[in-house]
Amino acid sequence: MIRTFPLCRVIGTLLACLLSVNGHGHGETPTEVGTRVSAAVSVTWRDDGMLLQDDGRWLIPGVLMGGEAYPVDGGVTVDEARLDLAHRTAERVFGRLQISSHDGVSDAEIHHAYGGLQLDTGPVLTTLAAGRMAAAMTPANGEHASDRLFSETPLPLQAFLGSQLNDDGARVSLDLGAWQLGLESWRGDSFPAAGEGEELNDVYLHYRDGWNGVPVFAGIWWLQADAVNRSDTRYSADGHDHGSVSQSTTLPEYWFDGRTEIGGAFLRLAGGHASHWHWALEAQYLQVSIEGSVRDSTRLAPWSAEDNGGWLQASLGRGAHTLGLRWERLVLENHLSGAAAGALADLTGLYNPDHDPQRSSAVYHWQVQPGLALRLEAVDDGIQMESIQRIAVGLVWQAELL
Amino acid sequence: MRCAGVRRRSRLWTLLYPLLCSVMLVACGGSETHLDDEAANKTAFDWALREGVPLPLEPAANPMTETKFQLGRHLFYDARLSGNGTQSCSSCHHQDKAFTDGLVVSVGSTGDSHPRNSQTLTNVAYNATYTWANPALITIEAQMHTPLFSEQPVEQGIDDRNRDAVLQRILDEPRYEALFAEAFPAQGSPVSFANIIDAIAVFVRGMTSFNAPFDRYQLGQRSALSASALRGQELFFSEALECFHCHGGYNFSDSTVDRTIAFVERPFHNTGLYNIGGSGDFPPDNQGVFEATGDPSDMGKFRAPTLRNIALTAPYMHDGSIATLEAVVEFYAAGGRNVASGPYAGDGRTNPFKDSFVSGFAITAQQQADLIAFLHSLTDESFVTSPRFSNPWE
């Protein structure tokens, strides 16, 4: 008993982290009455980073990058550090405040700051929330390095959501049995809206239940974002910095005006017994349609894109030890027209020389203690034309402080 | 129970099936980029551009042809194309000086001094405006009326009294008969000032220069730039020195237009050369865009010229008032020029119309040498020695 009890907790924690299906996941509404304070840190050493452009920018060929889609660097980096405070009353009023840094960015920011309430409206449980939060259309959007089995953010999220859609806005969700319908409307400051955003809305339908004892979490979603003057501000605070990445070359400035529509679907399955074998499967798919134009200070090119991307992830474990595989791929089809089509395709990184960016990763995850995990990863990075490999060793610390 | 199980399995497949189909779509691959330039990059002329440099604009009324280019080359170097037969375009635009003349200000065919320094003809096809400070002058064809026909100051000095004689001199040159006929095959009597202007404009427009060490470095020849020039390049493109804001892009000028450009900018800058009496004034014969617009805020504003071949085009500034590149760097480091005495006395550093990018900077002697080494790397030796641009009469 003395030995098995902590082991069960370890595995329970692990499954919770991997699947986020138990209602305590990183991006979700507090469900338990009381105050909860938690913290997490993910730190990783990598023998090499991602391939960058000569000017220091990280671009996925064929993608108009932006948001917070940062590459991983070689050496030791703090992938994520966060402090999370959540409170819920018996009257179903809740609030949440989270300060975190992620994707190797050293500055901490308010990641979550929202409040809300739940209303029992007949057979439907209605949840209202407003403030700054991660969009909930897919659980992957709210997860960071300490939540995931792998330390690196999924490639389709990097490409199409700028790593994560996190904005000021409001959410209405309706729960009926295993189903949840959610509507979210955002201020539009975040990628893929951003700039002088006009509109950013999403709708999702989630199904969360068990199937022959196997927890199932599945969903479909759709997002629409309008952007005006959207720039790639990843390497400067104000969008006007020519030298922070590399002093030898100026960073180009360009803007996107137009509409982005993204449809997505996901499925997460998990099974096994806590003290024995356990497994998990995940599939995510995103289909993106973009219509608009890219321009710099003097040139303009109408641009449309039909992209899709997704990933498959599987893991198998016994006790505190888990082995996992992940395969990610993007298929990007861009159409640019006008006299500046070629020049702007090169400048913005939209030119893709018939290459499907992809990445394959393997991980060994050892939950050493309930709050501490060791992670070993091997990555075959085919995001650029030239494929590279890297290995990573990381520690994930998680704690319930209150 | 069995039925319930089937229903559950069926519900799961309802979720699984479209997802698996989608994943198959991703697995199939097929990224591609379709570029449709809508024939914007179509040209019959050999522009001799390097990779990454867009084509310049080509006026529909005066398309580029090799025969016009060759006729224009002969006319450019022909002193008979002046009122008194003493001066050609090349008199103020010497090939070995990147088509400038090395003088503080140019001198016309009758001895008149021009108020301004002769500008390089390097890549003028890309100029958004022509001359030092005329926002309305946007084609070479329009600009050429000034050197040929202007009376104040006289340059080539062609006027109503001598224009027939000038044309007759051209007609009397045997080489021109074939050159004009080939350049303008559809015209019966092609020797006219309109055609002369068109031909010279084609020749000048075809003077492209993109084979400097800087260009070779851009194309991947890492040894093309010295260590000093590379350090200078970093300084040039740094926010500390701000050089690139007005002298950026492939032509090292913010006053650049090409076929890809949709929003044409025609900027002019006051660099703080003068501030007569503290009122922002420039010398009365040389006040920049203000002369064209009458707008006080345009006082002292001039076009930022290309820095390509800049090491060959001394002296510098619109009035040739700075002799060397070293002095130019010191001028910008000081954030302008303080004229201590004389009729133009005044502190240009505090000129109220001065461009905000001319704010001054600290620079060491080594950094100054590095910056100048980079400026020297913009010299295209093939441009200043190419037989294609040389005097055909020699």
Image (spheres, coloured by chain):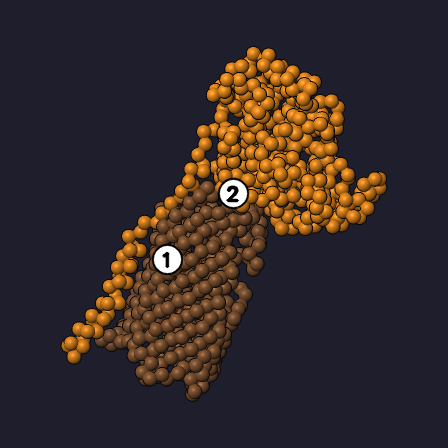
Chain colours: A brown, B orange
Q: Amino acid at mark 1?
A: Val
**Place of residue A340 in the rendered image (x, y in percent of width and height, measured from the top left):** 47, 43
Within 10 angstroms of label 2, few (less than 14), some, or many (20 or more) residues? Answer: many
Label 2, on which residue?
B261
Chain on which label 2 sits:
B
In the rendered image of this protein, does residue B114 appear above or below residue B37? Answer: above
Q: Nearer the viewer, residue B252 or A124?
A: A124
Asked whether residue B298 appears in the rendered view, the answer is yes
Which kind of residue does numbered mark 2 sit on?
Ile
The residue at which mark 1 appears reads as A288
Q: Position of residue B11 (x, y in %)?
A: 23, 71
Where is the N terminus of chain A found, in terms of image quarters? bottom left
Residue A317, relative to residue B53: is it above or below?
A: below
- What's the chain of the residue with tag 1? A
Decide: few, some or many residues near mark 1? Use Cα within 10 Å; few <14, some 14-19, many ≥20.
some
Kind of element beneath mark 2: loop
Residue at (58, 44) in percent of width and height:
B265
Say whether residue B173 is left or right of residue A273: right
* Extreme-front residue of the structure: B160
> Nearest the camera: B205 or A325?
B205
Residue at the image point whose x is 53% and y is 51% from the top: A253
Separation of residues labelled 1 and 2 (CA atoms): 29 Å
The residue at the point 59 percent across, 37 percent down is: B138
Q: Is residue B142 left or right of residue A91?
A: right
Picture quadrant where residue B145 is located: top right
Left or right: B316 in relation to A72: right
